[in-house]
Image (spheres, grey):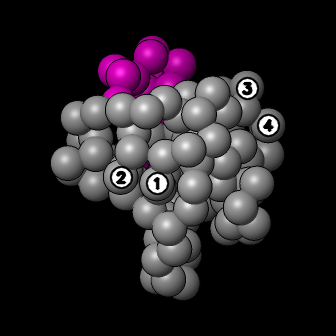
Amino acid sequence: MVKISVTNLAGQTSDIDGEVGLSLMENLRNNDFDDLAAVCGGCCSCCTCHVYVDEDSYSKLPELEDDEQYLLEDSEHFQAGSSRLSCQLEVDDSMDGIKVTIAPEA
């Protein structure tokens, strides 16, 4: 398990124990973050699992794939150097202490 700090749309921050091997999206949904719609279920075909990753945590993540980047750049809430799709991030031990904020939907 890794510690993940999550801020919801209301601005409330909670720490969760993330399960290694699951996507960040799955971990958020498993911990009842209803603000995260995740409509496509992790297929990288929508932007409803969009999160902002704090600067220190962002450097721990793999680079954006083209599909993810295209979806994010089309979002009115895109923030360069912060925006990621939580369905595209598999939680691993290097993410311990990561801080994310759920982004508003378009």
Residue 5 position, x and y percent, is: 44, 63
Task: Report the number of numbered marks.
Answer: 4
Instruction: Tell me the distance, in whole angstroms, between the alpha carbons under discs 4 and 2.
Output: 25 Å
Q: Nearer the viewer, residue 52 or 56?
A: 56
Magenta run includes residue 64? yes
Marks 4 & 3, CB-CB < 8 Å contact: yes
Residue 35 position, x and y percent, is: 67, 67
Instruction: Tell me the distance, in whole angstroms, between the alpha carbons under discs 1 and 4.
Output: 23 Å
Quadrant holding the N terminus: top right
Q: Residue at x 43, y 33 (%)?
A: 93
In the image, is 80 to the left or to the right of 3? left
Q: Residues within 10 Å of mark 4 (few under 14, many from 20)?
A: some
- Asked which secondary structure carries label 2, the reply is loop
For label 3, the residue is: 43
Say if 68 sits above or below 76 in the image: above
Q: Residues within 10 Å of mark 2 (few under 14, many from 20)?
A: some
Which mark identifies residue 3?
Answer: 1
Q: Given this view, does label 3 or label 2 mark the residue nearer the observer?
A: 2
* Of the image marks 1 and 4, the number of the one nearer the N terminus: 1
Say if 77 sits above or below 85 in the image: below
Marks 2 & 1, CB-CB < 8 Å contact: yes
For label 2, the residue is: 97
- Asked which secondary structure carries label 1, the reply is strand
* Of the image marks 3 and 1, the number of the one nearer the N terminus: 1
For label 4, the residue is: 41
In the image, is 40 to the left or to the right of 83? right
